[in-house]
């Protein structure tokens, strides 16, 4: 199976990214032909400082390597190291109806938040379709929020195939891979955890910062002795992701019976998070201390990715008559 996914370099990775996407990247790198990339072209729609963007790209590479992405198992690359992506985006753009992009929720949300309605933001899903179709991806691990973009990708691929296919499809239709248990990880305020809501717990925060963030998790105001509803509690949803099964059962039982305070759960959650990512934090320090090694991984990944991309781009160019 060809597996592919991308992540934007627009700030530190958080535990929503981890459970919603990165954990699946790591699981799927074994036994598959996996490609993972840092989506810096996409980040141009929000990051407007060249040095900051370059730093953020390095940081995401180091983060992914530290979390266990193995360059021997998967191809790790940077989107803009494969400029073929933008050429394919144009070929796809030419068969994409405006209406498909106008209905995309992430575009509408951003404009509603007051972000300028620039063409790049509008055309974002076409570039994402190019990322995916360029590598003949079968499976795309992502969180729930990317489901609509995957649907647009499939629609664009089908349309291109219908217009130019001559009986032979040009593009393979990809399937999203969304784990129900972590499709939407809640943030500190109970909304989807997201950089743009400033409600994140970063994977590589120091233990002290993690505890501080956990203390800010919004709950109701039931006192210790009162019974509580684990399902409706956003703190428990986060706790569930980290605690081992026996501890989860114990805490769930005490929620229902009464006799556990949110403060205790927050402290225990913070300890779990810090312990869970401690080995990755140490490995990250190693990569950061050796930036040349990160550059080597990046260069090797670019070469492999470009080789794969060229095959599909040539097929698409020939199909539509620009070659
Ligand atoms: P953000 O919303 O913080 O900007 P990104 O859009 O960069 O995060 O997301 C990168 C990957 O992580 C995507 O596959 C996305 O679906 C997934 N993801 C992001 N936030 C969450 C979340 N709260 N729960 C589950 N998956 C998430
Ligand atoms: N839009 C995705 C996000 O914000 C990032 C992304 C870009 C992506 N290209 C992709 C994800 C291709 C999967 C496949 O999270």
Image: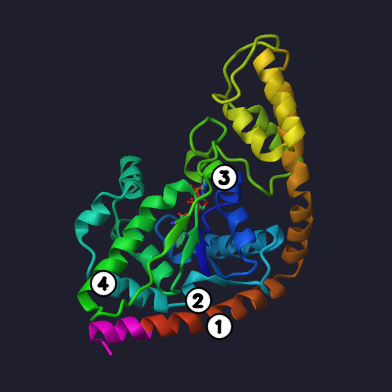
Contact (Cβ within 8 Å) of mark 2 with mark 4: no
Q: Report how far apart the C-alphas of labels 3 and 4 lie in the structure.
A: 34 Å
Residue 132 in which image quadrant: bottom left
Contact (Cβ within 8 Å) of mark 3 with mark 2: no
* Label 2 crowd (10 A; few <14 / some 14-19 / many >=20): some
Residue 52 in which image quadrant: bottom right
The numbered mark at residue 160 is 4
Q: Nearer the viewer, residue 307 or 48?
A: 307
* Label 3 crowd (10 A; few <14 / some 14-19 / many >=20): many
Q: Nearer the viewer, residue 244 or 262?
A: 244
Q: Residue at x 23, y 72 (%)?
A: 162
Residue 99 in which image quadrant: bottom left
Colouring: rainbow
Q: Residue at x 25, y 79 (%)?
A: 167
Q: Report how far apart the C-alphas of labels 1 and 3 lie in the structure.
A: 30 Å
Q: Earlier in the sequence, mark 3 or mark 4?
A: 3
Q: Give the number of marks.
A: 4
Q: Report how far apart the C-alphas of labels 1 and 2 lie in the structure.
A: 9 Å
Instruction: Give how far across and how far down residue 19 sits, in percent.
Output: 60, 47
SS at mark 4 in the image: helix
Instruction: Give how far across and how far down residue 6 sits, in percent.
Output: 50, 62
Instruction: Give how far across and how far down residue 303 sits, in percent.
Output: 55, 83
Q: Earlier in the sequence, mark 1 or mark 3?
A: 3
Contact (Cβ within 8 Å) of mark 1 with mark 2: no
Horizontal arrangement in the rendering, residue 115 relative to residue 64 (left or right)? left
SS at mark 1 in the image: helix
Q: Which residue is label 2 attached to?
A: 81
Q: Nearer the viewer, mark 2 or mark 4?
A: 4
Q: Which residue is label 3 attached to?
A: 16
């Amino acid at each position: 199976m060809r597996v592919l996914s991308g992540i934007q370099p627009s700030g530190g990775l958080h535990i929503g990214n981890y459970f919603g996407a990165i954990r699946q990247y790591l699981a799927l790198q074994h036994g598959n032909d996996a490609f993972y990339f840092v989506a810096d072209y996409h980040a141009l729609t929000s990051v407007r400082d060249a040095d900051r963007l370059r730093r953020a790209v390095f940081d995401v590479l180091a983060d992914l390597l530290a979390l266990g992405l193995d360059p021997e198992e998967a191809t790790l690359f940077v989107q803009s190291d494969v400029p073929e992506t933008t050429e394919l985006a144009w070929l796809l753009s030419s068969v994409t109806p405006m209406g498909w992009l106008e209905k995309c929720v992430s575009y509408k949300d951003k404009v509603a938040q007051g972000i300028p309605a620039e063409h790049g933001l509008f055309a974002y899903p076409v570039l994402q379709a190019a990322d995916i179709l360029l590598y003949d991806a079968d499976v795309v691990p992502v969180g729930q929020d990317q489901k609509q973009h995957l649907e647009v990708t499939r629609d664009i691929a089908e349309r291109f195939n219908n217009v130019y296919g001559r009986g032979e499809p040009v593009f393979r239709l990809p399937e999203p891979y969304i784990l129900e248990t972590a499709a939407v990880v809640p943030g500190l305020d109970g909304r989807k955890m997201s950089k743009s809501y400033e409600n994140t717990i970063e994977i590589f925060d120091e233990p002290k910062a993690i505890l501080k963030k956990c203390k800010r998790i919004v709950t109701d105001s039931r006192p210790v002795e009162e019974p509580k509803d684990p399902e409706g509690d956003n703190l428990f949803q986060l706790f569930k992701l980290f605690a081992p099964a026996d501890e989860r059962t114990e805490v769930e039982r005490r929620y229902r019976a009464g006799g556990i305070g949110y403060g205790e759960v927050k402290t225990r959650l913070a300890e779990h998070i810090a312990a869970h990512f401690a080995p990755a934090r140490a490995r990250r320090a190693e990569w950061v201390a050796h930036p040349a090694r990160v550059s080597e991984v990046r260069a090797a990944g670019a070469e492999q990715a470009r080789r794969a991309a060229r095959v599909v781009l040539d097929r698409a160019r020939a199909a539509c008559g620009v070659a």
